[in-house]
Image (spheres, helix red, strand yellow):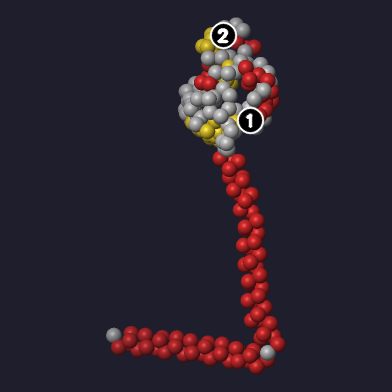
Amino acid sequence: MVYRSLEGSLGSLDAGYENVNQILKGVDREYTTSWQIMFNMDLSGNTLVGGIPVELTALSMLMGLNLSNNHLSGRIPYNIGNMMKLESLDFSKNELTGVIPLCMVALNFLSRLNLSHNNLFGQIPIGNQLQTLDDPSIYVGNKDLCGAPLPKNCSGHEDPTMDKMKNEAADGPMKVWFYMVIMCGFATGFWGVIGVLLFKKQWRQKLFMIAEETIDKMYVAVVVRVAKMKRGREAL
């Protein structure tokens, strides 16, 4: 991921500062002497671009993660469910795409979630802690998301990825037959000509004579053309 203009997002965690302002669960909180034991990452409101690094999910003790209001793209890391301590997660107002990972249902401590205003699609995972987060505003702004708590029903709805996979599966047999026809046509044409030349000596000799005559005519034409060009230059 490429970072641009962090504007001091992490600078406030320098050891020389006694007070640290951090946003957790949507609330701006100030930590003084106890900030060392606070596990929160807030990089919101910057110009971060690129994908969310999978390595970020290795921070298993993180309780709050806020990457909102950036220009992040790509998919939500598939193993984000490893961040078992997360209580607050905010990826809103980015350019994320893909489906919401099913492993997010394993975030048992998650009490605040915001994935709004992205390009996510597919069915919203159901189960465990996610089922308690029933505020539709969590997912608003993702026109291709469906399922509770959104009013859009998933029946008859297919996300773009599944639709593409089905089209590729349907086109598979046609592609196989297409290449088989091409190979059969090539083999028939190739051996139809080469086979005849192998077994018909007179035809083979005739073909070589035609080829030799053609080459001789081309050679003569080139020599005559070059001679005319030389005479033209000498006349000037």
**Viewer-nearest residue: 90 or 131:** 131
Q: Is residue 7 above or below residue 154?
A: above
Residue extending farthest right: 199
Q: Amino acid at mark 2?
A: Tyr
For the point 65% across and 93% down, the residue is 202
Q: Could you say whether the residue bearing mark 2 is in a helix, strand or loop? A: strand
Residue lying at 62% horizontally and 62% vertically, measured from the top left: 178
3 and 78: which one is in front?
78
Q: Is residue 179 above or below residue 117?
A: below
The answer, for residue 80, to whether it is visible in the render is: no
List x then y, in percent, for residue 110: 63, 17
Kindly identify which residue carries mark 1.
101
Please state the horizontal and vertical placement of residue 148, each as a whole percent of the image.
Answer: 58, 24
Is residue 80 left or right of 92 when viewed as pictured?
A: right
Q: Are marks 1 and 2 in contact (CB under 8 Å)?
A: no
The Cα–Cα distance between marks 1 and 2, rounded to whole angstroms, is 33 Å
Which amino acid, mark 1? Pro
Furthest residue to the bottom? 202
Earlier-in-chain disc, 1 versus 2: 2
Dot 1 alpha-carbon crowd within 10 angstroms: few under 14, some 14 to 19, many 20 or more = some
One can see residue 168 in this view = yes
Of circles 1 and 2, the one toward us is 1
Residue at coordinates 61% horizontally, 15% vertically from top-left? 111
Secondary structure at numbered mark 1: loop
How many numbered marks are there?
2
Q: What residue would you read off at disc 2?
A: 31
Of the pair 5 and 171, the residue shown nearer to us: 171
Work out which residue is located at the far top of the displayed protein and give it: 33
Instruction: State left or right for residue 74 relative to residue 183.
Output: left
Residue positioned 65% across, 32% down in the render: 78
